[in-house]
Image (cartoon, rainbow, N blue to C red):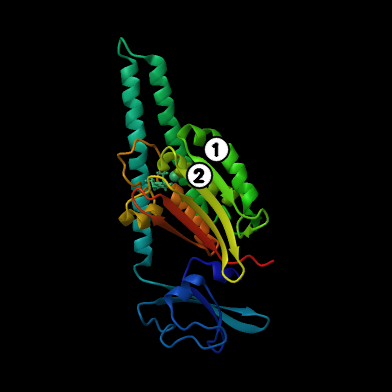
Amino acid sequence: MLIEESREIVVVIDSDRRLVAASRRAREAIEGLEEGTPLPEGILEGGEGHVPFVVPYEINGQTETIVYLSEPGDLAAYQELRAGFTASVSHELRTPLARLLALLDSAELPDSNVPELIELARREVRQIGELIDDVLFLSELESGKEVVSLGISAAVPLLREVADELAESAERAGVVIEIEGADETELPLRPRMIRVIARNLIENAIRYAGPGATLSLSVTSDAGRGVDLTASDDGAGVAEHELARLFERFYRADRARTSRGTGLGLAITKHIVTSADGDVIASGGEGQGLTVRCTFPAVDA
Ligand SMILES: Nc1ncnc2c1ncn2[C@@H]1O[C@H](COP(=O)(O)OP(=O)(O)O)[C@@H](O)[C@H]1O
Ligand SMILES: [Mg+2]
């Protein structure tokens, strides 16, 4: 039902105040929601900080009521988040643009190595393009314009495809990619989303694990529990206290490393995985490699 997927805190009740449906967010926000049982006391009266917005309608001769329970402050927090995001994007764009400008200035100097400067400038433009692509993709995911979780796909063949695409740059970086798992094991995602996740995880190992590292991408299924997609490398890793922050937008551990990136890859990965009712965790430590494990509920045959 559509209500389930709503981003709002919203419930539907029948004429006896019994619950017909509730959004996932409503279930998180309100305890004791259960289909067929009356709504907990006080909810409709605007208690506990909820300000309800009530819309009654008729269906099959019965009256049902849709109740939006927005939390005061919710909107403000959301707007703050958007504003913060815009500020971060502008800031992240300004850095490569400033470098680009400096390169153009150097190109005007009498003894400048123009071909080299052009190549460096090209890199900055690519960086800007990547950032814009990532920001747009993330906002498409968030606005629901790009549907994430409708679909089921066998993961291993897709992982292999992406690994092949990146084989050359992996070799240049001295990183070996291994793929493990049964070809037919399925994840609850469209092929495009599995490709996006695989690309992010493989590119990260190429960028950050360091030469000599091996990245193992594996898909495992456990009948009772679900399906996992795990990317585990034995490279440089990140400090333990940074592990939880890796999924934040624009967060990049140890900026001193010379690499370029948008800091959005793992944020996008997390968004995709949680949209499919999965979860993602990072483990490892400085010098102990990084493991990113995406867990999904079992796919029904
Ligand atoms: N395999 C890895 N090994 C070590 N550090 C990593 C690895 N993958 C990600 N990281 C760290 O996590 C940060 C965030 O990753 P990500 O969101 O993909 O952004 P980006 O790759 O654009 O920097 C990276 O900047 C890096 O510091
Ligand atoms: Mg990345």
**From this viewpoint, which residue is outermost toward the top?**
110
**From this viewpoint, which residue is outermost toward the front?**
212
Badge 1 vs badge 2, beta-carbon distance below 8 Å: yes
Instruction: Say above or below: 184 vs 59.
Output: above
- Please give the name of the residue rendered at 35% of the width and 41% of the height, measured from the top-left corner: 92
Q: Amino acid at mark 1?
A: Leu
Instruction: Say above or below: 27 vs 79.
Output: below
- Please give the name of the residue rendered at 31% of the width and 18% of the height, measured from the top-left corner: 106
How many numbered dots are placed on residues in this image?
Answer: 2
- Please give the name of the residue rendered at 60% of the width and 83% of the height, measured from the top-left corner: 63
In the figure, residue 261 lies in which quadrant?
A: top left
Estimate the x, y position of residue 51 in percent, counting from the top left: 39, 76
Left or right, residue 104 beside residue 180: left
Q: Quadrant of the C terminus?
A: bottom right
Question: Disc number at residue 166?
Answer: 1
In the figure, residue 113 lies in which quadrant?
A: top left
Estimate the x, y position of residue 210 in percent, counting from the top left: 41, 39
Estimate the x, y position of residue 249 in percent, counting from the top left: 39, 51
Q: Is residue 148 visible?
A: no
Q: Amino acid at mark 2?
A: Ile
Observer-nearest residue: 197 or 66? Answer: 197
* Neighbours of disc 2 within 10 Å: few (<14), some (14-19), many (20+): many
Q: Tell me the SS state at disc 2.
A: helix
Estimate the x, y position of residue 97 in percent, counting from the top left: 36, 32
Q: Is residue 276 visible?
A: yes
Q: Quadrant of the N terminus?
A: bottom right
Mark 1 vs mark 2, CA separation in Å? 8 Å
Instruction: Say above or below: 288 vs 203.
Output: below
* Neighbours of disc 1 within 10 Å: few (<14), some (14-19), many (20+): some
The numbered mark, 1 or 2, whose residue comes first in the sequence reads 1
- Please give the name of the residue rendered at 59% of the width and 68% of the height, measured from the top-left corner: 2
Q: Which residue is mark 2?
A: 202
